[in-house]
Amino acid sequence: MTVTVLVVDDHPTFVRTLGVLLTGEGYEVVGTSSDGESAVEQCLALQPDVVMMDIQMPGIGGIEATRQIVDAAPQIAVIVLTMFDGDDSVAMALRAGARGYLVKGARQDEIRRTVEMVLDGHAVISRSVVKHLPGIARERNGDDHHPFPSLTTRERDVLQAIADGLDNDAISRRLYLSQKTVRNYVSSVLTKLQVSTRSEAIVAARTNGIGSTPDA
């Protein structure tokens, strides 16, 4: 089955270049958008598999557009592709629900692998921005005192369920999510916590007061 992609960027030359690259990889570019509002509208209308999302655009911008897309259609994988790799940009994109974060200039093979991995349920962050994750983990914004502020609200629900010892099937029933969506959220949680396994995630969560503490 052909993977469908929506390209969102306000630079026409970049949109054309990325479209050619994606088409050359066998993907179908079903639409393009140059602002956040139309990106959300097109996502809901076209239901692409993947969105390649810039951050700075007219209107609501890429971060808010990502948040609205993920809230309305969590099965759509949003990959941020931007010039910005600072702590704030990475943190906001991840909190909004982006499954991938790449910096413009990423090689064609890196973009292809990222698309493949997010569709397989993984969260992917470019090596050039991984260095920002420790700062994100320490971040505290406003009244948000959650120990893992980079997590979205739904990812926090999933982490809570993981920390309670639930498997994916049980999480699916608790949160009324599909199995695929749960796998996507679990992968994103592990990436943001910088851990490789559910066991490590449980330890990190319980160390920070999240989840049921096993009996001694």
Image (tube, grey):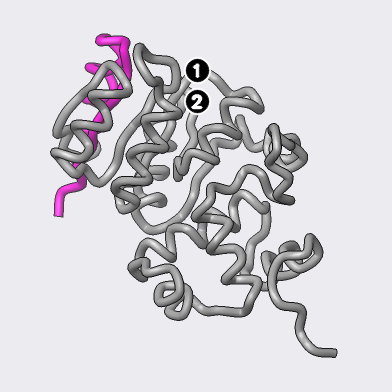
Q: Residue 115 sits in which quadrant?
A: top left
Residue 24 in sight: no
Please state which of residues 122 and 92 is positioned toward the viewer in this rendering: 92
- Disc 2 residue type? Val
Please state which of residues 149 and 193 is positioned toward the viewer in this rendering: 149
**Residue 36: percent from left, percent from top:** 32, 23
Which residue corresponds to the image point at 53% horizontal and 51% vertical from the top-left?
153
Above or below, 48 relative to 6:
below
Question: In the image, 129: left or right of 121?
Answer: right
- Per the rendered image, the range of residues in magenta is 1-22
Q: Residue 216 sits in which quadrant?
A: bottom right
Please state which of residues 181 and 212 is positioned toward the viewer in this rendering: 212
Where disc 2 sits, the SS reads: strand
**Residue 120: percent from left, percent from top:** 37, 58
Which residue matches tag 2?
A: 103
Where disc 1 sits, the SS reads: loop
Give the mark nearest the N terminus, 2 or 1: 1
Residue furthest front in the image: 143
Q: Are marks 2 and 1 in contact (CB under 8 Å)?
A: yes
Which residue matches tag 1?
A: 83
